[in-house]
């Protein structure tokens, strides 16, 4: 976790103190369930809860013990016993390390998912507000980076809203995917721990029992979780790149807010660079990079191995912390985005009316001209305009083959921008359910 790209609420989830507190809760809930089943004395479960809850877990002390034991869970249990006393012998009855580690990891991922869902909600709120603000702000649509046909800036933002709505649903599904608990003991057979203990612990932690844990929770669940983070990161990058292109000097239809006192370049005082969206592009690359090792973690040896462990110690915090930061940065970019409708209009006019070429093509076919001939006629008049030699409407009107089929008035009607925006309400109703 890089402090520069971290937010406190998410980083706290991965703090050692948080992890050890969750480990304790797993052990204490298990002890309570065992006491209710008559497996351990009720008084022992009470002591474990009371003394463990009051304990301040000493991370340095646990690390010191681990340097000897070479085992993190044993080091924690040893330290816990220092707080609990003799009743600590009833802790971890019939359990194995993976019961604690895997259940804790899933608790952390669920908590991280809840933060990420709130982050996505902020992005959605910003996109919706700005989409309605610019619902009818006409701008040029581009394909291959080249002027195509008109759209509106609101429609551009509506696509992003729809995409992040899907991202939210995927995040909910990913949360559900990893919200499982395993308290099944060695190789997952419940030989030394009653399945009812697992059911109790799962309920207390807001999880579900893992149907078959084989000692570890199957990593296909985690692969799906991190793949979801990667897809969300890709959606962030898609929108970030759109803004970066719109901020180019030759385009300048929208740009990141440039605050008082901000500097764009150490060498050139005039620069206003899209640094936030460039940063988002880089962060998206990192989040995507964590998806592959999560997928490679699925294939473990037999009932378990720990080849996944070192991976998850890195990708769990890094992927969630980075995506949390990126989503909030993106929300801020959209909330404060500076939009230039006048530049959008200038860019619409740059090609001398060529953006209406398809309408002319279709109109000619409606007049009985074959599509091939219609395309030839329109392109014949479009290419000089592309080279800066006249305007499209005048050239078409002067072309005898075109004017034989379409009058000047009919041609002028084909150059109406409103034609291209007549279904914006339909799009908005589909995306937002309102207009």
Image: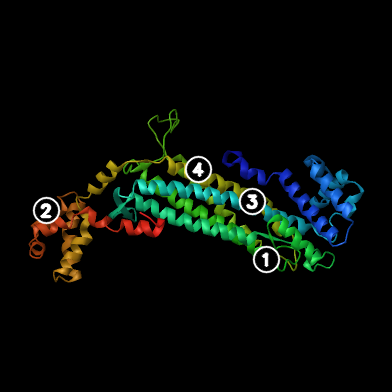
Whichever of callouts 1 and 4 sits on the residue coming sooner in the sequence is 1
Q: Helix, strand, or loop for circle 2?
A: helix
Nearest the eye: 389 or 310: 310
User: Which residue sits at x=25%, y=48%?
Assistant: 348
User: Which residue sits at x=19%, y=56%?
Assistant: 383
Check residue 394 in the rendering and tell me which mark sits there, or answer none.
2
Is residue 315 at least partly visible in the picture? no
State if disc 2 and disc 3 touch (CB < 8 Å): no
Pointer 3: residues within 10 angstroms few (<14), some, or many (20+)? some
Q: Helix, strand, or loop for circle 3?
A: helix
Pointer 4: residues within 10 angstroms few (<14), some, or many (20+)? many
Q: Residue beneath label 3, please?
A: 111
Whichever of callouts 4 and 2 sits on the residue coming sooner in the sequence is 4
Distance between the Cα atoms at labels 2 and 1?
A: 67 Å
Q: Residue beneath label 1, please?
A: 299
Q: Specify the farthest residue to the top.
A: 261
Quadrant of res 372: bottom left
Left or right: 24 as drawn, with respect to 386: right
Check residue 329 in the rendering and tell me which mark sits there, or answer none.
4
Q: x, y percentage for residue 177?
A: 62, 62
Distance between the Cα atoms at labels 3 and 4?
A: 20 Å
Distance between the Cα atoms at labels 4 and 2?
A: 47 Å
How many numbered marks, from 0 up? 4
User: Which residue sits at x=73%, y=63%?
Assistant: 216
Distance between the Cα atoms at labels 3 and 2?
A: 63 Å
Q: x, y percentage for residue 266?
A: 45, 30
Nearest the eye: 362 or 269: 362
- The correct choice, above or below, for 330 with respect to 201 in the image is above
State if disc 1 and disc 3 touch (CB < 8 Å): no
Q: Quadrant of the N terminus?
A: top right
Nearest the eye: 269 or 129: 129
């Amino acid at each position: 976790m890089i402090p520069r790209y971290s937010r406190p609420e998410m980083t706290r989830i991965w703090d050692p103190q948080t992890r050890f507190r969750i480990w304790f809760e797993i052990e204490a809930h298990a002890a309570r369930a065992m006491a209710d089943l008559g497996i351990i004395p009720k008084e022992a479960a009470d002591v474990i809860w009371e003394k463990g809850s009051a304990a301040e877990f000493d991370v340095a002390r646990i690390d010191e013990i681990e340097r000897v034991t070479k085992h993190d869970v044993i080091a924690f249990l040893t330290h816990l016993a220092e707080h609990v006393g003799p009743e600590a012998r009833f802790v971890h009855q019939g359990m194995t390390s993976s019961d604690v580690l895997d259940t804790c990891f899933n608790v952390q991922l669920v908590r991280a998912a809840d933060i990420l869902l709130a982050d996505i909600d902020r992005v959605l709120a910003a996109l919706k507000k700005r989409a309605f603000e610019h619902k009818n702000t006409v701008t040029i649509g581009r394909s291959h980076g080249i002027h195509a046909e008109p759209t509106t800036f609101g429609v551009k933002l509506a696509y992003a809203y729809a995409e992040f709505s899907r991202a939210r649903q995927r995040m909910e599904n990913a949360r559900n995917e990893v919200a499982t608990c395993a308290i099944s003991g060695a190789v997952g057979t419940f030989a030394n721990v009653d399945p009812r203990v697992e059911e109790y612990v799962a309920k207390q932690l807001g999880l579900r029992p893992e149907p078959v844990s084989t000692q570890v929770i199957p990593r296909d669940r985690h692969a799906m979780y991190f793949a979801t983070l990667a897809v969300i990161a890709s959606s962030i990058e898609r929108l970030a790149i759109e803004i970066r292109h719109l901020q180019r000097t030759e385009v300048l239809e929208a740009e990141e807010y440039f605050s008082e006192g901000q500097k764009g370049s150490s060498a050139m005082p005039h620069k206003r660079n899209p640094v936030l969206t460039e940063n988002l592009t880089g962060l998206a690359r990192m989040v995507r990079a964590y998806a592959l090792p999560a997928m490679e973690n699925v294939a473990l040896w037999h009932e378990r191995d720990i080849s996944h462990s070192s991976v998850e110690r890195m990708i769990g915090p890094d992927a969630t912390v980075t995506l949390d930061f990126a989503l909030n940065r993106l929300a801020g970019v959209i909330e404060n985005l500076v939009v230039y409708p006048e530049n959008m209009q200038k860019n619409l006019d740059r090609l001398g009316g060529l953006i209406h070429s398809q309408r002319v093509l279709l109109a000619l076919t409606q007049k009985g001209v074959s599509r091939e001939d219609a395309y030839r006629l329109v392109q014949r008049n479009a290419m000089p305009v592309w080279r800066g030699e006249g305007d499209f409407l005048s050239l078409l009107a002067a072309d005898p083959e075109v004017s034989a089929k379409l009058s000047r008035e009919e041609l002028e009607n084909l150059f109406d921008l409103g034609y291209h925006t007549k279904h914006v309400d339909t799009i908005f109703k589909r995306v937002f359910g309102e207009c």
